Amino acid sequence: MIDQDLNNVEPLVYESKIGVPYYWWAGDTATRFLEAIRDKGELWGTRCPECGKVFVPPRKSCPRCFGQQTSWEKVGPGGTVVTYTVARKKREAIPEDVPVVFALIRLDGADTAMLHKIGGVDPDKVSTGMRVKPRFAEERKGHIRDIECFIPD
Amino acid sequence: MGNKRVAIVGTGQTFHKSHRPDVNGQELINEAVAAALKDAELTMDDIDGIVIGNMDHFEGINYVDCWSVDGSGGFMRPIIKLTTGGTTGSTLAIGGYHMVASGMFEKVLIIGWEKNSESDTTGAITTAFDPIWDRLVFAGAIAGLAAEGQAYMHKYGITDKDAARVSVRDRRHAVNNPHAQLRKEITVEEVLASPMLSDPIHLLDVCPRTDGACAVIMASEDVAEKICPVPDWIIGCANRHTYNYVGDCNLGNIDSMRCASAELWEKTGIKEPRKELDVIELYQPYSFAGILWIEALGVAEPGKGSRYIWDGNTDMGGELPINPSGGVIACNPIGATGLIRCAEVALQIQGKADARQVPDVNLGLSTGFGGCFWTDLILHSKQKPE
């Protein structure tokens, strides 16, 4: 922000009043993934028929070889921590109490990792390669937070 | 190759600062444009096409091609806007190169600019990430870089002290560059003692936020040598984008740069980049990249980048000086940053880099880097290509 060096003048600041609300359609593919979590507590990815890679989050077409007809394949629920970070500072975008552990988790059967949180463990005990499984929320709404977090398996 | 050979015949930059409350965006752009025209001894009437770009959302002005005409000189001229995130500046250069190489434009003005002081950089960058999958828990630029740095440290056993040496180099070089924002030397100890932002990245390992603009004029072979005694010939470009979702990334391996550089060396006949290149302006937003990415370019062997740097090879006077300008760690007006790398190599080829001049530069590389580990490369030569 324009601030510190302006010691000699008091800038007139007009706060922008423009609000630009956005709405994002998840689309059929993401919706099916989220509904499977909500209704059955299951995790599904998509397999490319050409290169054989399984993507989570699911893709309608293959981002690697551009194969168009991906098919659904059940993955997990267990997975492996690929990498993680510990957020220790409370920020606007973090609704949880800190510290909170964000991680990339490669679900069993998937070739790519999905982003989520790790809970139920001291953040300092989390490690790369750690085995984890999802803990589902009791009340589920079709949101990615229907998985509360992943916990040690 | 296109129909026409292409050279840079003029460059201009602002004196970049953390914030420029004395000018608006159009006026900032105009400073760089006027400087580039003066450098090439041309006027706006000589220009037959303009390419301009900056980061989406950074200033909250979305039709920059239109809004900027008062400063860019674009009134009643053909203008295209390009924006590709961190690579915007280098993409602008590649876009301008394509326009001139096509033979459809003879003299193109290329402008990159940013007023980072006018918004929340991390908030704006976060809008680049997928709103359904990534944005809820992944934000800004630094997290992905920290993951890359960690992966490399784990693989090769380097430490944050090794990375700090890269910051020390760039900040020392920046003292020679009047256009750089941060022109004060730092020590390894100061880097390590600076606040940890995202492990292993300390405050002094990473780029600042800067207000600044850069303009470059490219001309075709039909006029380049008439405009300029030593044109900076562009002899090849390569670029690659990789993943979309963060979980797809091959952390610690910048596949885009490895692939783009392999293409560039192959098509320009470069066998040993370490020996053949005379200078690199690397879009290096944090210190660890100064080690990892020279390995991806084939300048150092895998795992040997840190040793190469400690031995002084990339310092001024070394085998292959990197970032004589001070680079991105000393100055980062993001939409201009990639174009500044290109302009700085042009100055090196032309012998106009003053206190930061590397002696006898015949071949130089400028690069661009963007948020999801993508890469632009531009190879510059003093010799007119065959």
Image (cartoon, coloured by chain):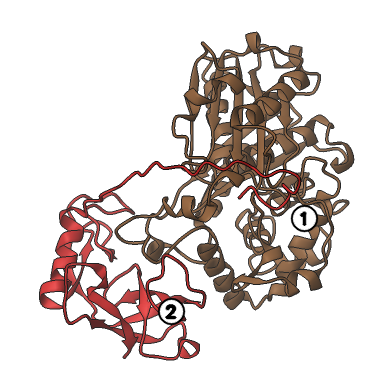
Disc 2 target residue: A101
Tell me the quarter of the picture where residue A32 sits: bottom left
Tell me the quarter of the picture where residue B178 sits: top right
Of all chains in the rendering, the one displayed in brown is B
Q: Are marks 1 and 2 on the same chain?
A: no
For marks 1 and 2, give the one nearer the viewer: 2
Give amino acid for label 2: Val
Q: Nearer the viewer, residue B46 or B70?
A: B70
Residue depicted at 43% across the width and 79% down the height: A100
Disc 1 target residue: B170
Q: Residue furthest top?
A: B45
Of all chains in the rendering, the one displayed in red is A
- Judged left or right of residue B151, residue B185 is right
Q: x%, y% of residue B306?
A: 72, 67
User: Which quarter of the figure is the C terminus of chain A placed in?
Assistant: bottom left
Would residue A95 be seen by someone viewing this image from the given angle? yes
Residue depicted at 71% across the width and 21% down the height: B34
